Every structure is written in structure tokens, then in C-alpha cells.
Amino acid sequence: MLLEGKKGVIVGVANKRSIAWGIAKSLSREGATLALTCQTEKVKKKVEALVESENLQHSIHICDATNPSQMKESFNKIGEDFGNIDFLTHSIAFAQKEDLDGSFVDTSEDGFDLAMKVSTYTLTSLTRAALPWMKNGGSIIALSYLGAEKVIPGYNVMGVAKAALEASVRYLAFDLGKKNIRVNAISAGPVNTLAARGIAHFTDMLKAAQNRAPLGRNTTIEEVGDTALYLTSELGRGVTGEVIHVDNGLHLLAQ
């Protein structure tokens, strides 16, 4: 029970394939009390069914991370219910399909702005909303991908957004260290999520990753979840500003 008595927020659970759901399961298994946030009422109903199917007791809230007033209202409600927030997990990203297809040089200005706002800036804005309730320090985690470091065909503007996300992690870690708040990112290998299926030739990416990874298999949401557990718990108390790769060694061989 590494997180017994700890309370926190996970942003981005959409369905049973979500990386955020893998994290929720790992943290819940070790005693954490969770608040899960969803962008819409439609998604909330799906998450409620998912939580019920696992016999969990997590609260679920509507929170559009691009809506400052709604975000502040949601975190104040969660903070008042919990009394304190010990951790935050950011697992949201979005880019328009037309900006993931074709060449990066053709990325539209509006598409670039949207990808950066949703995938990158929300880490900062969500952190700011959580800060008043993180009175005793804690842990903040973002989800990245190898496309932040290497060119992954078809990842395009999302790779740039993830690179900015990783830089944000480092700057937030510097700012918040004095408050005893650690900020890290997990760079997972390709995971068969609903969002990932929007990337062209994603099935081919999965096969290539499995063939190239030193461990010879693809990343699971459970592996990412247990890494988040390490970073959230006291086991990771000395780690901040880092990008932890959970890709079965794929980053060692990526070209």
C-alpha cells in the first residue's frame, strides 16, 4: 500500500485502453484515492461504467482543460472534497488529423496552436489549478513519447508538442522544487490506445517497435501505470525533471 492515505487527480481517462486508466489501476491498487476528470458528459458516462466494472470508488468530474474557469471550478471542488491533493497525472493530447497526415511542413498555424494548447500548455494550466491544494508537496506526471526526441513519420506536430511538453516538465520541476513538488514525464512506447489509432500506419509502428525493442514486445498500460506508481510514491522521492522511458528499450535503437 505505497499510496495509502494519498489523494490525487488523473486527467485523461477515456476508456479501458487509456494509458491514464493503466495509471489509475496501479495507483488505486496501492491505496490511492483518485479523482478522474473527463472532457465531456459522454466520456464521463463511459468512465463511470469502467470504474463500476472494477468495483472502484473514484469520483469522476467534468473538466475541459482548455477552459480556465471550468478547470478552476473542478479543482476547487476536488480540493475541497479531498482537503489536499498529493499528485496530478496529465494524460491528454490532441492534434487535427490533417496535421498528422502528410508532411510536417504543411502543418497549419491553427493546427499547430491547437496541438500546443491541448497537448502542452494544459500541463502548466492544470498544475497551476492544482497548486493551491498541493500543500504538502507531491508529484506531477506528464505522458510523452519518443517522437519528442526522434522523427517518427506520421507523428509530425504532435512530436513538436511533446518536445515542448518535456521542456515544460523541466521548467516546472525547477519552479516547484522549492515547494517539494516533483515533476516528471513518462515516455511510453507505442501503446494501442484509441488516440494512437488516429496516427497513420500505427499498426505498422506497433509491429516495428516490437521487432526492434530489446525486450521484444510492446509497452502495456500496466507497465506505464507501475512506473507512474514509482514516481508518485516515496520510492521516487529523489526524482524530478526527468523523462523516464518505458518502451522496452526501443529508444536505445530508434533511428
Image (cartoon, grey):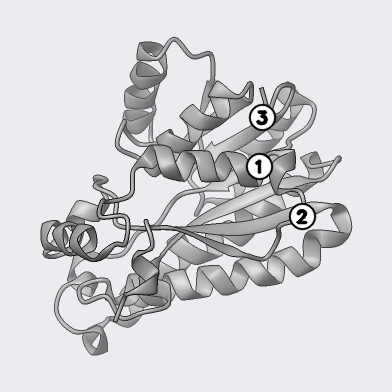
| Residue where numbered disc 3 is placed | 78
Q: Disc 2 and disc 1: Cα gap in Å?
A: 11 Å
Q: Residue at x 75, y 40 (%)?
A: 234
Q: Is residue 64 above or below residue 190?
A: above
| Residue holding disc 1 | 232
Q: Secondary structure at mark 3?
A: helix
Q: Is residue 33 above or below residue 40?
A: above
Quadrant placement of the C terminus: bottom left
- Quarter containing the N terminus: top right
Of circles 3 and 1, which is in front?
1
Which residue bears the numbered disc 2? 238
Q: CA distance from mark 3 to mark 1?
A: 18 Å
Of tags 3 and 2, which is closer to the observer? Answer: 2
In the rendered structure, which disc, 2 or 1, sits on the residue that comes first in sequence? 1
Give the mark nearer the N terminus: 3 vs 1.
Answer: 3
Q: In x, y percent, where is residue 101?
A: 16, 73
Residue 100 lies, in percent from the top left, at 22, 71
Mark 3: amino acid: Ile
The amino acid type of the residue labelled 1 equals: Thr
Give the percent coordinates (x, y) of residue 140: 65, 50
Mark 3 touches mark 2? (CB < 8 Å): no
Residue at 23% over, 73% down: 99
